[in-house]
Image (tube, rainbow, N blue to C red):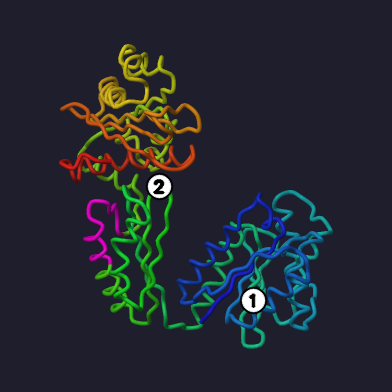
């Protein structure tokens, strides 16, 4: 069965608001066996909205919309769908009472304008909204299911989980979507594709998507099937072959982020870590502390942009910076060793580089980054040349630094980021 998602709201057609609801709805619909074939974003104009719903009725079994159920003049989803189906709107007194009661609970009188949220399409099932005033609506028409949900994310999510998903499960759709998520670091998207494309081509029933970001490459092999055991076995086999092809660049096969993997390795080895960052400006510390319980392994860090702070806070000799430059192998080594010594951490990480767009020289171009890791045996350093603008270089640098920690424990003889 096919599904279509319609996100209603003129604000979603501006650069100021993202449609995040569709991502959540796609995941939820996939879990009950519905393949999302189309998504659309449409403004509040009735003619455009009507056109979107008309086209959806031509190609989807289930249509789920978000937005346009509020109390203002531009909330037109109910009226548009009612007109399209040739049905009337009526005021549901029970819904109206529940809206009044919600306002009373918060010590407020209900504005008259909110009465329009009690208008229900003839023949619709009201889906009670536990987190807001706009109820959802479930309609069955022309052999299709139409679900109208509010656009506020927390309201939509609650309605989807409590009201919509159980109803969809009763449809008894035999197929389900089975997925895996591989995380890769240290190589670029084209390298990943070259290593694995011939493998997933041998599994025509599967689909594999490659997603690239500064925080690493993701591989998403997936399979629609009504045979769970066969689907899991097929994906396990494909993932095993992909893992061999990706080698030391494979971070995880179950979707764990690089910082999760690093946290696990530090915990297993009863190790602690401290960072001295220049070009990454705190991004490395932010990622290391993004997980609950990070205080068990993260000691602390210093964002030492100026040469003076590199010396006073981390202990990098001023004459070393003067002779070699702040962006150099020698300074990166001194940053890692210095922060380890001053904090008493098991490992020290040092990052220095030229994120651009200014500050480069012919010998030290934009994107040149030096990353160093230090343990009780001393520091080791890896220079890399990264592509992209300032933000991407900073993100890539933090990713490579974290990956160096992973490789330190899993592949200690490789010595590369």
Our reading of the magenta stretch's main secondary structure is: helix
Looking at the rendered structure, which numbered label has been put on residue 364? Answer: none
Residue 216: say if magenta: no
Q: Nearer the viewer, residue 283 or 331?
A: 331
> Can residue 92 be seen in this snapshot?
no
- Compare marks 1 and 2 and give the one earlier in the sequence: 1
Q: x, y (%) of residue 250?
A: 27, 54
Residue furthest out toward the bottom: 143
Image quadrant assignment for residue 123: bottom right
Residue 249: say if magenta: yes
Query: Distance from label 1 to label 2 (Cα)?
Result: 40 Å
> Can residue 364 be seen in this snapshot?
yes
Q: For mark 1, what is the residue?
A: 138
Chain part drawn in magenta: 239-253
- In the rendered image of this protein, does residue 388 appear above or below residue 373? below
Q: For mark 2, what is the residue?
A: 215
Residue at 79% across, 76% down: 89
- In the rendered image of this protein, does residue 269 appear above or below residue 374? below
Q: x, y (%) of residue 252?
A: 29, 55
Residue furthest out toward the top: 319
Q: Contact (CB < 8 A) between labels 1 and 2?
A: no
Residue 179 is left or right of residue 358, and the answer is left
Residue furthest out toward the front: 362
Q: x, y (%) of residue 417?
A: 28, 41
- In the rendered image of this protein, does residue 152 appear above or below residue 379? below
Mark 1 closeness class: few <14, some 14–19, many ≥20 residues within 10 Å = some
Q: x, y (%) of residue 135?
A: 68, 67
Residue 105 is left or right of residue 182, and the answer is right
Residue 171 is left or right of residue 192, and the answer is right
């Amino acid at each position: 069965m096919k599904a279509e998602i319609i996100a209603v709201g003129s604000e979603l057609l501006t650069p100021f608001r993202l449609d995040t609801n569709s991502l959540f709805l796609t995941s939820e619909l996939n879990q009950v066996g519905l393949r999302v074939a189309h998504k659309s974003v449409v403004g509040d104009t009735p003619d455009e909205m009507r056109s979107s719903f008309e086209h959806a009725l031509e190609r989807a079994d289930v249509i789920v919309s978000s937005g346009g159920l509020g109390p203002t003049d531009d909330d037109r989803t109910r009226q548009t769908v009612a007109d399209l189906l040739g049905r009337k709107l009526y005021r549901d007194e029970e819904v109206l009472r529940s809206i009044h009661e919600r306002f009373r609970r918060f010590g407020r009188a209900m504005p008259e304008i909110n009465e329009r949220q009690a208008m229900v399409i003839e023949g619709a099932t009201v889906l009670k909204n536990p987190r807001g005033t706009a109820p959802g609506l479930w309609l069955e028409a022309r052999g299709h299911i139409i679900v109208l949900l509010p656009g506020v994310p927390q309201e939509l999510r609650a309605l989807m989980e409590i009201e919509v998903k159980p109803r969809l499960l009763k449809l008894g759709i035999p197929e389900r979507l089975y997925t895996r998520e591989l995380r890769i670091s240290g190589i670029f998207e084209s390298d990943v594709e070259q290593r694995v494309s011939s493998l997933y081509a041998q599994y025509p029933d599967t689909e594999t998507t490659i997603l690239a970001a500064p925080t690493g490459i993701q591989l998403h092999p997936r399979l629609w099937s009504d045979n769970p055991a066969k689907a899991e076995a097929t994906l396990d086999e494909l993932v095993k072959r992909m893992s061999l092809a990706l080698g030391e660049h494979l971070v995880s096969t179950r979707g764990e982020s690089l910082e999760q993997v690093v946290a696990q390795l530090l915990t297993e080895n009863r190790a602690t870590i401290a960072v001295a960052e220049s070009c990454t400006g705190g991004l490395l510390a932010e990622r290391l502390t993004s997980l609950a319980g990070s205080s068990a392994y993260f000691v602390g860090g210093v964002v030492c942009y100026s040469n003076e702070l590199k010396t006073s806070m981390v202990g990098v000799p001023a004459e070393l910076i003067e002779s070699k430059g702040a962006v150099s192998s020698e300074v990166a080594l001194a940053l890692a060793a210095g922060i380890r010594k001053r904090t008493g951490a098991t490992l020290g990480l040092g990052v220095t580089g030229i994120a651009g767009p200014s500050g480069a020289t012919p010998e030290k171009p934009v994107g040149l980054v030096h990353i160093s890791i230090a343990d009780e045996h001393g520091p080791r350093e890896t220079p890399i040349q990264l592509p992209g603008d300032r933000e991407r270089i900073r993100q890539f640098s933090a990713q490579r630094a974290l990956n160096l920690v992973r490789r330190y424990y899993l592949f200690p003889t490789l010595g590369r980021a």
